[in-house]
């Protein structure tokens, strides 16, 4: 019988106060892993910690601005001080600003690159500081199918997410000698808070019924399996990638998208 047991492992998940990050953190905890919850929303992170502790595993929350390297390092240091080590890093925090390329402000461009790309760089560096000396570790970086497909209104977002793929591929080769696995995951279409913001723009602030109709029509038109993904779908992939079942998987970019970006 195949099962995944992460008891004794220590993880950090960023952007884990809600949505996809929360789902990943809860699934890691379900497998027995102690989890550090990093997010700008500290109260939300604390609530996730309470849920995880009810599963009889350890958890700690820390407020982090992933676009700030010093802040990120401080947060990771705090979690390692609490847990004693770091086995798993999931760089999930991200934002989406979808609008025509020439309508983006300089501030919006900087924010997309600072959080969606630089934030992953900073988180990976903060994790490798501990993983390299211990000669082991698993890092999963969240990209997007937008990085592979291209989409109107998502040029800078897609560019940043493509950078995450290139970063993960290159570092997987660099860190392999230290027995560290680094992979990227590309979620498909998931109705998270990021999508809700986009739906408001797509429907001109339409009501719930209108947004539901637009989302369902868009999803079925883009996804061969004709259904959107759930946060748990991506969480299951992450749990697999950080387990011993995936010990020989590194430098890969895996789509969890219902066939949206078949290649």
Image: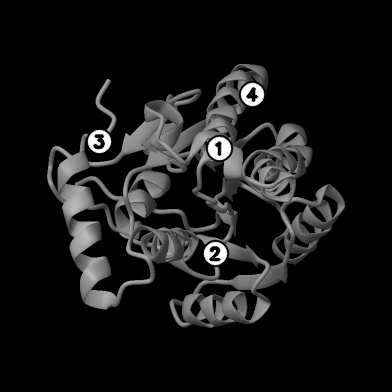
Whether residue 258 appears in this view of the structure is yes
Disc 4 to disc 1: CB gap under 8 Å: no
Does residue 39 lie above or below 160 as drawn? below
Does residue 35 lie above or below 224 as drawn? below
Of mark 4 and mark 1, the one earlier in the sequence is 1
Label 3 belongs to which residue? Answer: 260
Of mark 4 and mark 3, the one earlier in the sequence is 4
Disc 3 to disc 2: CB gap under 8 Å: no
Of mark 3 and mark 1, the one earlier in the sequence is 1
Q: Nearer the viewer, mark 1 or mark 2?
A: 1
Label 1 belongs to which residue? Answer: 101
Helix, strand or loop for disc 1:
helix
Helix, strand or loop for disc 3:
loop
Disc 3 to disc 1: CB gap under 8 Å: no
Write the residue at 36% across / 50% down: 234
Helix, strand or loop for disc 2:
loop
Of the numbered discs in the image, which one, if any, rests on residue 171? 4
Of the numbered discs in the image, which one, if any, rests on residue 16? 2
**3D distance between C-alphas at marks 4 and 3:** 26 Å
Does residue 116 lie above or below 61 as drawn? above
- Work out whether residue 178 or residue 1 is closer to the camera in this orientation and state it: 178
Mark 2 residue crowding within 10 angstroms, few (<14) / some (14–19) / many (20+): many
Measuring from the top left, give residue 181's x and y in whole percent.
Answer: 54, 30
């Amino acid at each position: 019988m195949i099962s995944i047991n992460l008891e004794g492992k220590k993880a950090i998940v960023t952007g884990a106060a809600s949505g996809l990050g929360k789902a990943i953190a809860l699934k890691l905890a379900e497998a027995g892993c102690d989890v550090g919850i990093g997010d700008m929303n500290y109260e939300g992170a604390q609530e996730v910690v309470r849920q995880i502790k009810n599963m009889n595993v350890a958890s700690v929350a820390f407020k982090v601005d992933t676009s700030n390297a010093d802040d990120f390092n401080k947060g990771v240091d705090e979690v390692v001080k609490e847990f004693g080590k770091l086995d798993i890093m999931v760089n999930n925090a991200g934002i989406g600003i979808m609008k025509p390329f020439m309508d983006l402000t300089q501030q919006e461009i900087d924010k997309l690159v600072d959080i969606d790309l630089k934030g992953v760089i900073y988180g990976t560096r903060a994790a490798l500081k501990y993983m390299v000396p211990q000669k082991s570790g698993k890092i999963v970086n969240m990209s997007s199918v937008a990085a592979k497909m291209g989409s109107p209104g998502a040029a800078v977002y897609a560019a940043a997410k493509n950078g995450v793929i290139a970063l993960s591929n290159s570092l997987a080769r660099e860190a392999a000698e230290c027995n560290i696995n680094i992979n990227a995951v590309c979620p498909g279409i998931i109705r998270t808070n990021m999508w809700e913001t986009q739906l408001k723009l797509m429907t001109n602030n339409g009501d719930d019924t209108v947004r539901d109709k637009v989302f369902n029509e868009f999803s079925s038109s883009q996804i061969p399996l004709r259904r959107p993904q759930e946060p748990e779908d991506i969480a299951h992939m992450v749990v697999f990638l950080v387990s011993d079942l995936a010990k020989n998987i590194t430098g890969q970019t895996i789509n969890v998208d219902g066939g949206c970006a078949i290649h």
